[in-house]
Amino acid sequence: MTGNIIGNQNPLVGTTCSYEVKPSILSFGLKGDYEWYLYKKQKNGSWKDITSQPKKGEKVTFKFGEIGLGIEFQMKVYETKKGILPGLPTTKNLVASIILIPTSNKVPKIDKVVLFNRGGTNVNKASYRDTLIAQAHCIAMFNKEIEFHLWEDDAPGKGHDPVINKNNRHTRSYKARVNEKGIAEVQIPLMSDEKILRQMANQFLMKGDKSEGANHEYYVTATYSGKIQGASQVNVDVANPDYKGQPQSQPKPKPQPEKHTPKFPAGQGGGPKQPDPKGNIIEAVFIDDTGEELSKVAVGDKVRVRIHSKNMVEKHIQYVIWEYDTASNDEVFRSGNIKISADIHDTSGFVITKDIFEKGIDSPIGDPDSDKQNYFIEIISKDLSAESQKFGVNSEGLMEVEKVKSAAGVQKTQKPDKPGSCICQEQYKDLVWGGKVSCEFRKKVIQIAKNLELPQKNYEGANWLMTIMALESAYSFSPKCGTFGKNPDENSKYKYIGLIQFGKAAAEEIGTTRTHLMSLTAEQQLDYVEKHFKKKIYQNLLKNRTALYLAVNYPNSTSHASERNYVVYDNTKDAYDDNPMFKRETHEFWIDKAGKKQYYKGKEGKSYVWEFEEALKEVEELGQSNKTKTFTCNNNSTKNDNISAKDIVTYHIYHDSKIEKHIPKKIKEGNETKYKYVYHDSKGNEHEITTVDWHTTREKGVGQVYKTKPTHAKVLSDQNVSEGNTSRRVKYENGDIAEYGTHPKKGIIWLLYKAGKNNVELIKMPDSLNYKKDGVYIAYSFSKTQRRYTGADSFAGFIGYLAKSGYKLTTTGSCFSEGSSFPSQEHCNGRSVDTLYLSIVEQDQKVIDSAIFFHFTEVLKGVNAYCQKLKRAGNGGSLHNSHLHSGNFNSSVIKTIKEK
């Protein structure tokens, strides 16, 4: 303990005082009538009283701990004297004061590093579904940042050989600060990087080994100030999904997928396929009866398989459905022989019955697959026309299958009570804040509330979810709301995005990134909202609305949500001033002259659970006045609706904003990758506008700015191009694309568009349209851009709003053929189209209103004097002074009708 004494006298006059040798501990005793007070200096320079007054004559020992190192404390000692005469007050005189600055005599170091599976029965064993915990136990390093790296161990025996393992370090780093207990802790979700880790583990083998064996062995190193200070000594064994060995004592091995199946689907990180001139199976995915891809189903649901192939028409295949296990996969369904009818062939499918589900359960007691399983597809060529393939076997492609008490009960909530009516109008009309979101969004929230086992009566749990998302997204329900969207930077921890304001750590814990989350629609982002609440740390805690919100705002307090006087945080935490809505005590705010509540900053205060409860109640009550009043729900039809499509998939765009996608029973040869667009005017006339080609590509994340060429992955091609602002394009083995050129504000930069897990459909826009007939005018032309691709659904909306406005517009484009969009960071996947202003307020206002009418949910204008005259468009900054941005088309409004 060190101290600087104020004044010339003994600091504790009339007392006995002793300083113990141990660091950061103050011990003293007081004799006589004395009182002492201890104060801690705050960041704003004020002093906070932290006194715990002892009984008279009691020895006091005050332990500061590492959290107090370097912080200034002040002690004051007062002598108390009783009044000379009875009834006179007691007086207190200051007799001494001292400034204390705790230091440590310990040498700062990382004492121990450990890696373990906190959720496992054996902490040293895991699967690629698990999240590992890495800890560095430190001495005298409070608040220092520790960086962790994950390594795969190929060295034989115990210990880690830096030479053997030199290529086995995972590229991702994990950072944490040392807490007051001397521990820095990070979570390492294996599933989010499973593909990379498995490739790394299987690439470098121990000398003489032919395979990696049943387990991949992992350890971590802890680094401080750029130097490795320690490593975990006990490895965690992660089950190797590619291990094919079987115990000799096992009389009959389980059937497994064909041995010549590659480890990963083509195009998703696997090795290059051998060329097959006879035929090629490109992809297989799970779909429903409407053709929508599936990522999650339940027992009782019907699934079909869509097979993408080349040169396989009239050939025969068979598909097998496997339940994914970390050690041994289980076959749950095998189809009969199927003749491929087209390059894109949809099978008739099957229902996931209870018997099928139980085939994936290895043990009747304690099997983790007894409630939830993951399926993938194997395609077997029966004519030897192509190699057999398996698809969706990695973490990105697995379809989740849940066992539910009543599949019929789940089905029931998906259908309206009256045939042909809108499900929202019939069942979900009382959902708070429902007027801010789409029908599809409302339906999905209802289902998530059921999956989380929240209260179902009067949709109470769903209303909790809507309330929380309203509060976190500033009532916008925008997937791009937040500080991260203004300047995307994955290296920054303190930027947030989306419906519940995902931070860096929160996104990584559910296997994604903020960049990917921002690229999703609100409906798609709901899947990640559900994943957040399903984390183990919240199990059995989400009992009320406040608990649900604390799981987002301050997770460590979730378990205290029922304790009204529990302090969630106080002024020592940044969250206190960052969340003024929970300042509800009279000393925390004042009312200004306009009658508006204003909040103090930098003052002492606390945010209690009851203040959260009050705020959430107010938000939910406000949501009562924001219920939906218009119903545009268009459930994908499985009935034999009237089909107006001959030999080709056709989008029908109606003058009243309705859009339908008609899929004929048989698509004419040559039209498999074409879409037709037809407009219906107010008189019932049909106008065939155009027919376009479409293709699929890996979805791309929002562009990330680089000053130099990204070198994070193997380069497949690096080409000079001349496409508007774009002068160079680099394609990477993992599907990413980087583009180089001149940005109107940032100058000469690179933009990296990272490939996502899903495919998107893009159409090639005609170079121009100039349709004019019977009062319908649909026209546009391009200006100085080669970004002439866009989403198939978005193009339908674009045609609708061109017809609605009645003006010929000039567009500066949407995206390139593979979903990138330089110089725009956010036009990726063709989700936005830019058009130049007409420079007449009445006309540009009509264009804005037409875009909104045809379901573009993000219409942005500039900030100059002219743009300020335009209404009902968001602030797009000075970048949009020259053009209007129409983006985030709401695809859920499109009704898909298939001919039976």
Image (cartoon, rainbow, N blue to C red):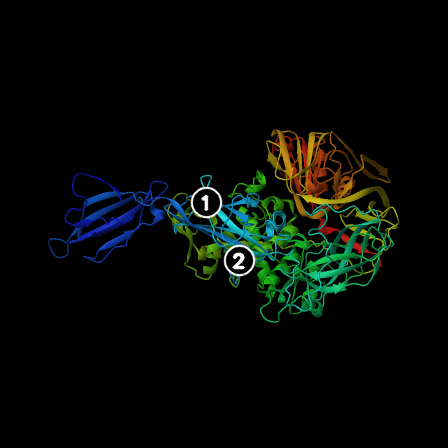
Q: Are marks 2 and 1 in contact (CB under 8 Å)?
A: no
Q: Does residue 548 sit above or below 478 in this rendering? A: below
Give me the residue at 81% from left, 34% from top.
Answer: 768
| Amino acid residing under circle 1 | Ile
Indicate the position of residue 261 as horizontal and vertical percent values.
73, 54
Residue type beneath disc 2: Leu
Residue 832 falls in which quadrant of the image?
A: top right
Callout count: 2
Can you say whether 680 is above or below 372 in the image? above
Q: Position of residue 501 (x, y in %)?
A: 55, 48
Q: Is residue 230 visible?
A: yes
Q: Residue furthest bottom?
A: 364
The residue indicated by pointer 1 is 146
Q: Secondary structure at mark 2?
A: helix
Q: Position of residue 123 (x, y in %)?
A: 50, 59
Q: Residue most toward the left?
A: 84
